[in-house]
Image (tube, rainbow, N blue to C red):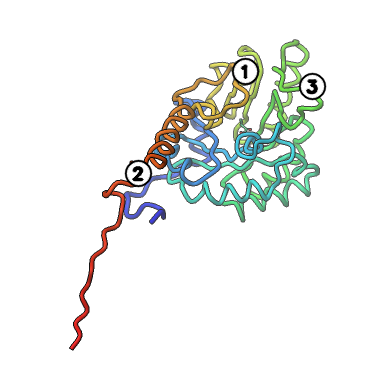
């Protein structure tokens, strides 16, 4: 009853070369996060180019204060569900905190995401210090998306979720990080939480597409957490989020209406009930 839709025209998947080509040819890349089958189906139908099963699931799905406890098993589990839904969008799996602590560990866990989670690429946080890890994964044929700027997995070291690269020396370091990731073989780089001009400078400095989140309008694409842009997440409301709907309020209103109708007896109505067809048995 709730299985994948049936006979539909085949749709071509967005590939790594397609995304690389968007740097020069455009249009900007539209990336979103998803964590389950139903949401992924809708986001794919809406035309998202890239879907990320982010470790943000720790906060928006599991209700944790940060992403640190998320495991590779969590990402595999949600990847399986999301991968069943996507017809067009390219699927990226986030590598959680400590799942890429050495190049060997990184390769083993990236392999799990591809083999078990149905992912087409992996993403990991960090700059020059993870270049060797990226190289190792890429040499196994697994595409890697980098992630520089505000790194949520270093929340304790940063002293909170704070905009990065405000000082010239920090901005220069983040640009060097992005270049190191490009040299190591990343096919694209997420830039999170930096001033817009730093986002623009990083984007100019690398030949691979950059995908911004709170990094200004000059990046080669943008990414948002689905529950943020759909207006569902009731927690943090960062400045960079634009809410394209208020589905959270709609869900609360719909739930209130349902609760009232159940209590009043208005639901289920006859059209929601199965009739009983009495079949008379013929007895001799
Ligand atoms: O975990 C995540 O959802 C992310 C994106 C916000 C880029 O890393």
Mark 2 falls on what kind of element?
Answer: loop
Residue 96 drawn at (x, y percent): 70, 41
Residue 182 shown left or right of residue 247 in the figure: right
Of residues 90 and 52, the one nearer the viewer is: 52
- Which residue is depicted at the point 54% across and 27% down? 228
Q: Is residue 26 visible?
A: no
Q: Is mark 3 within 8 Å of ligand 1?
A: no
Residue highlighted by disc 1 = 199
Mark 3 falls on what kind of element?
Answer: loop
Instruction: State which image quarter holds ligand 1.
Output: top right
Categorize mark 2 by other alpha carbons within 10 Å: few (<14), some (14-19), many (20+).
some
Q: Does 124 appear above or below 242?
A: below
Residue highlighted by disc 2 = 267
Measure the alpha-carbon separation of dots 3 and 1.
Answer: 22 Å
Residue 258 drawn at (x, y percent): 41, 38
- Front: mark 2 or 1: 2
């Amino acid at each position: 009853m709730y299985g994948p839709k049936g006979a539909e025209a085949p749709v071509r998947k967005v590939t790594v070369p397609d995304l690389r080509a968007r740097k020069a040819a455009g249009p900007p890349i539209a990336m979103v996060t998803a964590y389950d089958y139903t949401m992924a189906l809708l986001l794919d139908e809406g035309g998202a180019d890239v879907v990320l099963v982010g470790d943000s699931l720790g906060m928006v799905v599991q209700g944790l204060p940060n992403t640190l406890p998320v495991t590779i098993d969590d990402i595999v589990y949600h990847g399986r569900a999301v991968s069943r839904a996507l017809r067009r969008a390219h699927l990226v799996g986030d590598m959680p905190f400590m799942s890429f602590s050495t190049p060997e560990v990184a390769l083993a866990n990236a392999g799990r995401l591809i083999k078990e989670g149905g992912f087409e690429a992996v993403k990991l946080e960090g700059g020059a210090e993870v270049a060797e890890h990226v190289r190792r994964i890429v040499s196994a044929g697994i595409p890697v998306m980098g992630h520089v700027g505000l790194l949520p997995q270093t929340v304790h070291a940063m002293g909170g979720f704070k905009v990065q690269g405000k000082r010239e020396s920090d901005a220069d370091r983040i640009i060097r990080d992005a270049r190191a990731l490009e040299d190591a073989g990343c096919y694209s780089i997420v830039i999170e939480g930096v001033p817009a001009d730093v986002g623009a400078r990083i984007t100019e400095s690398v030949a691979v597409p950059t995908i911004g989140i709170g990094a200004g309008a000059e990046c080669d694409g943008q990414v948002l957490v689905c529950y943020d842009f759909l207006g569902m997440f009731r927690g943090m409301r960062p400045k960079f989020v634009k809410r394209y709907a208020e589905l959270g309020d709609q869900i609360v209103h719909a739930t209130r209406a349902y609760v009232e109708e159940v209590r009043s007896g208005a639901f289920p109505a006859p059209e929601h009930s199965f009739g009983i067809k009495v079949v008379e048995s013929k007895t001799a």
